[in-house]
Image (cartoon, rainbow, N blue to C red):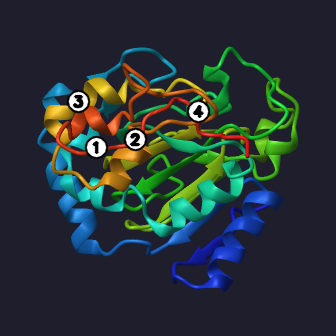
Amino acid sequence: MIVPTVRWTDTDSTRRVITDALDDVGCCVVADAIDDETVQAIRRELVAFDDDGSIGASAFEGHATRRTGSPMPRSATFRSIAMHPAVMCAGTHVLGPTTGWRFSASEFIQIGPGETAQRLHRDQWKYDMVDFPNEIEMNGMWAISDFTASNGATQIIPGSHRDGNTEPSNPDAAVPAEMTAGSVLLYTGRLYHGGGANTSDGWRQGLSLQHAVSWLTQSSNQFLECPPAVVADWPDDLLRFIGYAKSGNGLGYWRDSEDPLSAVHPDREYVRGWATVRPD
């Protein structure tokens, strides 16, 4: 089984292909979702922080893989695509039945020559390996370089989002999600996947994405990475997306039942109250 691919056009038919693929096989590659100029800008903005990245923190994280965090504050270009229509379409479809969902984390992941294949896993295992009755994450990977079978393209087992919460029954069924730079791989938190082995002489560059239902802790602490003093000139919809928002029925409020955006813009008036679900 291959990973379904659709060329990005912001149309109902493209959105339907994406949502159908996520339902049927748990993943989809959206080709050419951003242009080369955007890709190059993200690369320039993030490679500037290579010296801050972590290499070899563990076998799972990769001894020949560089992981650089905080792309949201470090890359203005990434901020401009964080709410890309393809990402929002997938997130709303997969996580929309819950009381809300939001951005959880991102990493600039560069897999170097000689890296071995990562253990296949489910991203939702970060939550104590609880076998939730519904999807709680919708994640992805932006290709900042071409992803090929030889340079470490993400390995995916299409359809494994329906498997039980144990090790994959058939790891040999994994296939590389090959895609050109500017494409994005979208997949659910239940799907078994892992970084591929890099047998080439170049680096595979990808920007990982994590999104989760809003009643779960975000993978990366967005309020430390993106504190009020840093985000004051960011769009309100992006601030809500990264967590400056109430959610559920009594989650996320600040101080005296205040809207968390009032911490960013104390000069503005916001409705007070911790409840987001109000009875008639």
Q: Which mark is residue 242?
A: 2
List the residue tagged with mark 4.
275
26 lies above or below 220: below
List the residue tagged with mark 1.
72
Q: Are marks 1 and 2 in contact (CB under 8 Å)?
A: yes
Q: Which mark is residue 227?
A: 3
Which numbered disc flags the more N-terminal residue, 1 or 2? Answer: 1
- How dense is the environment of label 2, judged by Cα within 10 Å: few (below 14), some, or many (20 and up)? many
x and y percent of residue 168 in the render? 81, 32
Q: Are marks 1 and 3 in contact (CB under 8 Å)?
A: no
**Amino acid type of the residue that numbered disc 4 sits on in the rendered structure:** Ala
**How many circles with numbers are drawn on the protein?**
4
Q: Quadrant of the N terminus?
A: bottom right
Left or right, 37 with respect to 69, comes to: left
Which circle, 1 or 2, is nearer the viewer? Answer: 2
x and y percent of residue 259 in the render? 39, 35
Q: Are marks 4 and 3 in contact (CB under 8 Å)?
A: no
Which numbered disc flags the more N-terminal residue, 2 or 4? Answer: 2
Q: Secondary structure at mark 2?
A: helix
24 lies above or below 63: below
Which circle, 4 or 3, is nearer the viewer? Answer: 4
**Amino acid type of the residue that numbered disc 3 sits on in the rendered structure:** Pro
**Amino acid type of the residue that numbered disc 2 sits on in the rendered structure:** Ile
